[in-house]
Amino acid sequence: MNNKPITTDNAATSGVTFFGLGIAPKILDILEKMKFKVPTPIQLKAIPLALEGKDIVGIAQTGTGKTHSFAIPMIQLLAQKKGVGLVLAPTRELAIQIDEAFQEFSRAFGMKTACLIGGAPMPPQVQALRRDPKVVIATPGRLIDHMSQWNFLPDSVVMLVLDEADRMLDMGFAPQIDKILRFLPRERQTMLFSATMPKEILNIASKQMKLPLSVEIAPSGTTAEKVTQELFIVKRESKTQLLKKLLAQYHGAVLLFSRTKHNAKKIVRSIRDMGYSASEIHSNRSLAQRRDALEGFKSGRYKVMVATDIASRGIDVTGIELVVNYDLPEDAENYVHRIGRTARAGHKGHAVSFATPDQGQDVRDIEKLIKATLPLSKVAELTLDKFGESADKGSAHNNSRRPGFKGQRNARPKKDFKYPKPKFYR
């Protein structure tokens, strides 16, 4: 159906509680024990609509409680009817965290959950599916594996959630999502949640959802409310020295983002040489290694966790003091998700970005998206006052960032090459 989402207004939550949102008393008791007293804006708007059975497109920056916005209604509605709830997530870590959030409520209703993720052995997941779970949380590829072996029957799905839907498309899951959607019943409730909502997601909403309501708490590209930001222009060879100064200044947990897996390994070695504990999390690490890295980071065993963008939305750790963009992200939207790992749940946080002299256009793309100028800071003998001339005059680096070049620095378009339409930002 080609129905445009209907937008609801933002609302303040001052003086509002979870009472009066239509939540069942048993779930309210659980929220009380968890000391959850005031709903976040996305919870305030989304929960009543979801409990009415509406299709929802939820847009809110990271760390604002999106998981409970769909977990609470799904548990309550599934307790009253037959069928299964399905949640799709882009990363293993996020799927595990969603499963943990669901279990806080599902146990009280005698419901079982199943978490289906790649990198983990199949037999325990098959056993979990044979126990008739009411909620299945999965990464797209692993769900298709189970569907192809008849371990999971998609025709039982009555509620579907796509969490971090734009990230799933960025990670190349579009074919898998299309395949899954083709096998799901048309008569179902569907909810999309994300921090950004590009055009591709709106296309899914118009084709796969019934009169979806758009719950937009913050404009697409809005950064976390209490995060402060800082930019350093630094030569590539000086990044390690600048990082050393930052780690001496910040004593709390630090999440550092590298653009590549290879560079992440090098950075971890450098940090350890500085005398700090560090771990790494990226797609080359096994599930056990990634779990150890995340748990060690949460417990304080590691001061620094070095991650690629696979973790930009898969890490839910309260109390990260500093996010360091050691490498700027390839996609400006990932900047929002990276820095959203700090300043979560109302806490304060800080984000620092390292930009090389030829990355002026990359920084401008970020500033355009977040509608703010990144404050420039300087460290004597390590940083520069401004970007290089080449960044403003169509350098080879800039050409590599234009659509169609896919990172080839000196590539030229073919004679009849047509540039794709620019990415849609709201």
Image: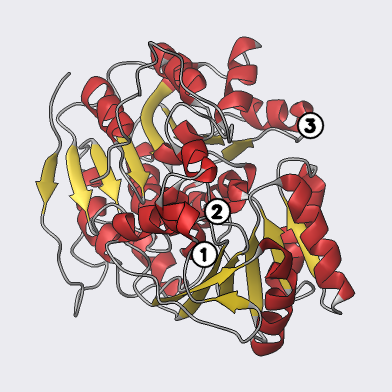
Q: Residue 121 carries which label?
A: 3
Q: Is residue 144 left or right of residue 425?
A: right
Q: Name the residue under label 1.
A: 341
Q: Is residue 226 visible?
A: yes
Quarter location, residue 379? bottom right
Question: SS class of the residue under badge 3?
Answer: loop
Question: Mark 3 or mark 2, which has the lower sequence index?
Answer: 3
At label 1, which amino acid type do we have? Arg
Rendered view: 303 above or below 20: below
Q: Are marks 2 and 1 in contact (CB under 8 Å)?
A: yes
Return the x and y of residue 364 as percentages of the image width and height.
Answer: 37, 57
- Dots 3, 1 in contact, CB < 8 A: no
Disc 2: CA contacts within 10 A as few (<14), some (14-19) or many (>=20)? many
Tell me the distance, in whole angstroms, between the alpha carbons under discs 3 and 2. Answer: 25 Å
Q: Where is residue 38 in the image (x, y as percent from the top left)?
A: 30, 73
| Amino acid type at mark 3 | Pro
At numbered mark 2, what does the secondary structure look like: helix, strand or loop?
A: loop
The quadrant of the picture occupied by the N terminus is: top left
Q: Which residue is drawn at 74% across and 76% down?
A: 241
Between the C-alphas of marks 2 and 1, the distance is 7 Å
- Mark closer to the observer (3, 1): 1
Residue 176 percent across, percent down from the top left: 51, 20
Could you tell which of marks 2 and 1 lies nearer the N-terminus?
2
**Mark 1, residues whose alpha carbon is within 10 Å: few (<14), some, or many (≥20)?**
many
Question: Where is residue 420 drawn, in percent x and y?
Answer: 34, 24
Q: Which residue is drawn at 53% across and 51% down?
A: 329
The residue lying toward the viewer, choosing from 361 and 267, is 361
Image quadrant where residue 407 sits: top right
In terms of depth relative to the viewer, which is nearer, 226 or 77?
226
Tag in front: 3 or 2: 2
Q: Which mark is residue 312?
A: 2
Amino acid type at image mark 2: Ser
